Amino acid sequence: MKAILAVFDNDGTLCDTQEVEGACYARAVESVTGKFLSSLDWGLHAEPTSSGIARSLLAGDSDAAGKEAAIEREFTRLLGEERAAFPGDFSPVRGAVAFLGRLAGEGICPVAIATGCFAASARYKLECCGIDLGAYPHATSSDTPRRSDIIRLAASRAGFDIGSVVYFGDAPWDVRACAALGIPMIGIGRRHERLRELGIRHAFRDYSDPDAIIGALRAGG
């Protein structure tokens, strides 16, 4: 069997992110730029990543880089402020931590993380879930705004070409990114039924059946 790299999205796939993240991001954007997001549905944005949305809003602004950095700081601060009120949004998807440990502990395959979050917010949310972002090869939207490029960069940092990747994601935009890259995807999270409708053969609510997920992984997604 050829070598496989399991690349995990963060929000909805490892961290059981729900509503508070989008609200905090919108508040951060408004605080820094005075602009309002057209929608809290990230699927309606051309490039649904933290930096992709920010760069679209800041196009033509001479201080775009500075304002993007300020949005990242304010967003991460707001997440910290809201954690006590929304603890579920800062908790791991059921079984996620044990599943990552099993992949490593049993030598099943290496792991990388590719997230559309800013680096600081991704690090914070994963830390809340008991996962150290720095322990894995990873890429974030602080590196590059396009989700497909984030996945490719995470694989490269892990020492793999993109053809070796099986991606774990939770959203329709993950499906599109995987289709663009020509890689298989395993669905995880609250949108698992929607992912099956979009053609993802293996989609699970959480990691409570790790043997089935590992079987899907070994089958190449």
Image (cartoon, rainbow, N blue to C red):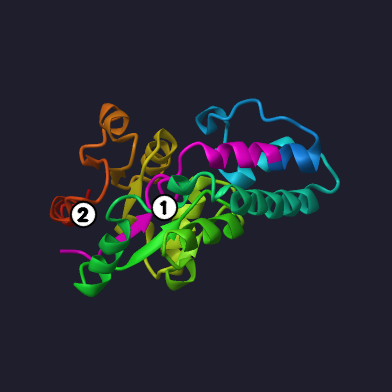
Foreground of the two, 51 or 150: 51
Residue 73 placed where, x, y %? 70, 55
Residue 18 placed where, x, y %? 46, 39
Vertical side of 22 occupied by 197: above or below: above
* Residue at 86% over, 46% down: 62
Q: Which residue is mark 2?
A: 217
Secondary structure category for the residue under label 2: helix
How far apart, in angstroms, are the residues tagged by discs 2 and 1?
24 Å
Vertical side of 219 occupied by 24: above or below: above
Secondary structure category for the residue under label 1: loop
Amino acid under label 1?
A: Ser
Q: For the N terminus, give its image quadrant.
A: bottom left
* Residue at 31% over, 29% down: 194
Task: Give the side of residue 128 with respect to residue 79, left or right.
Answer: left
Question: Quick check: can you spot residue 116?
Answer: yes
Task: Give the side of residue 165 with respect to residue 215, left or right.
Answer: right
Vertical side of 174 occupied by 217: above or below: below
For the residue carrying disc 1, how many other residues have a C-alpha within 10 Å: few (<14), some (14-19), or many (20+)?
many
Q: Residue furthest right?
A: 62
* Residue at 77% over, 52% down: 65
* Residue at 58% over, 55% down: 121
Q: Which residue is mark 1?
A: 91
Residue 14 painted magenta: yes
Amino acid under label 2?
A: Leu
Q: Nearer the viewer's eye, disc 2 or disc 1?
A: 1
Which badge, 2 or 1, is on the more N-terminal residue? 1
Look at the image and give the residue range highlighted in magenta.
1-27
